[in-house]
Amino acid sequence: MHHVVVGAGPAGVTAAETLRRLDPAATITLIGEENETPYSRMAIPYFLIGKVGEDGTHLRRSPTHFADLRIDHVRKKVSTLDTATKTLTLADGSTVAYDKLCIATGARPVRPPIEGLDLPGAHTCWTLNDARAIADLVHDGAHVVLMGAGFIGSIVLEALALRGVNLTVVEMGDRMVPRMMDDIAGGMLKSWCIGKGVNVLTETRIEKITRCTTGDCEDTLEVTLSTGKVLPAHLVVISAGVRSNIEFLAGSGITTDQGILIDDHLRTSAPDVWAAGDVAQGRDLTTGERHVHAIQPTATEHGRIAAQNMIGMDTPYQGSINMNVLDTLGLISTSFGLWQGKGGEQARMVDAHGYRYLRLEFEDDVLVGAQCVGMTNHVGVLRGLIQSRTRLGPWKDILLRNPERVVEAYVGATQLP
């Protein structure tokens, strides 16, 4: 039996390792596009600020890890997939045949059609190679413009700010992390960042990037904003969202939407093909709809369950939950599930001066969504209540009056008869 896993991120690595554990005699091939030891993108900010070296980003520390497991790690890009012949064609023209296939190709950063985005000094911050380029350009006092204050952008923001740069964040939405926080929470985060010396411009777009042509330029680029203002920049970091890597599947017969559509066993529409991680569009636990949840806990869980189903273990996946935890210059913010609500009742606690916020969203007496700022002690409880769809009974009315009693509610509701 030849198991092939395409994608060497957390989903792919977990799938390959699980396959080896469950099928000791199988041939296993792990194909990764980058010429790198498999690493975690979530560790890149720590590399940028010098908390870890490159080896600290690696998913597995031993350089012989995959060889020791008899997993063949191929560092080439997959160009096409033929599901009829069960064959992958690689960028160099070579082919790999499979018996069972897991697609875990992840996502890539979006590059908006903005003039000058391809100039030297404009970089995404997605790969380890991107991080190397950025690390070479940043220095204390350098002018840096960050395009985008979404979840990934806000992680990059912290890494850049801690390098001591003169940082301006340009976000076209009306608040920071608009897909994770409401106007109150996003406004708190903006105010917090400004207080830490970061210039945050919301409802603003980058119109173009040009080379600085005047003789007294200290920076290499000029960034023109929708407001008409022009910012000097030694470095522009692009964080404008991500898109699932599904282009190589054209003509394969695999059904795609925003990602690869999967069933509750992570199977695709093609026989003997599964999908996992940021490329997989599966069931949302709170809505029942199919979404791409591009977070590492979901990716690793996908990898494990896909592998179990590939070797014949009937392992259904209960569905993922939209979950984000963000640390921005010391302010922790989180959102879970249907944080914008589903038409049910809502409870809020706002302490703007103390940078504390809690919002709970209900459907009947079930908590279906939540968001927090500056309140880390509720994180596990909120996730547990939403994932378990625990009926709160009388505790719902208590939370409507005082949402900070959510820990008591969890204990009380789980003990209800």
Image (cartoon, rainbow, N blue to C red):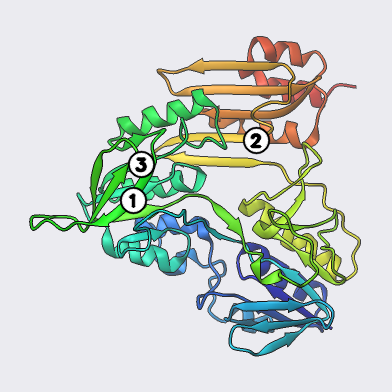
The x, y position of residue 269, in whole percent, is 84, 63
Earlier residue among tags 3 and 2: 3
> Quadrant where the C terminus lies?
top right
Between the residue at mark 3 and the residue at mark 2, the CA separation in whole angstroms equals 25 Å
The residue mark sitting in front, 3 or 2, is 3
Kind of residue at disc 1: Lys
From this view, report whether residue 360 is shown above or below residue 81. Answer: above
Residue 86 lies left or right of residue 70; in this view the side is: right
Instruction: Report if residue 160 is visible in the image.
Output: yes
The x, y position of residue 360, in whole percent, is 65, 23
Can you identify the residue that label 3 sits on?
A: 169
For the point 67% across and 24% down, which residue is it? 407
Can you identify the residue that label 2 sits on?
A: 336
Q: In which quarter of the image is residue 244?
A: bottom right
Earlier residue among tags 1 and 3: 3
Q: Residues within 10 Å of mark 1 (few under 14, many from 20)?
A: some
Kind of residue at disc 2: Phe
Can you identify the residue that label 1 sits on?
A: 208
Asked whether the beta carbons under mark 3 and mark 2 sit within 8 Å of each other, the answer is no
Earlier residue among tags 2 and 1: 1
Residue 319 lies left or right of residue 155; in this view the side is: right
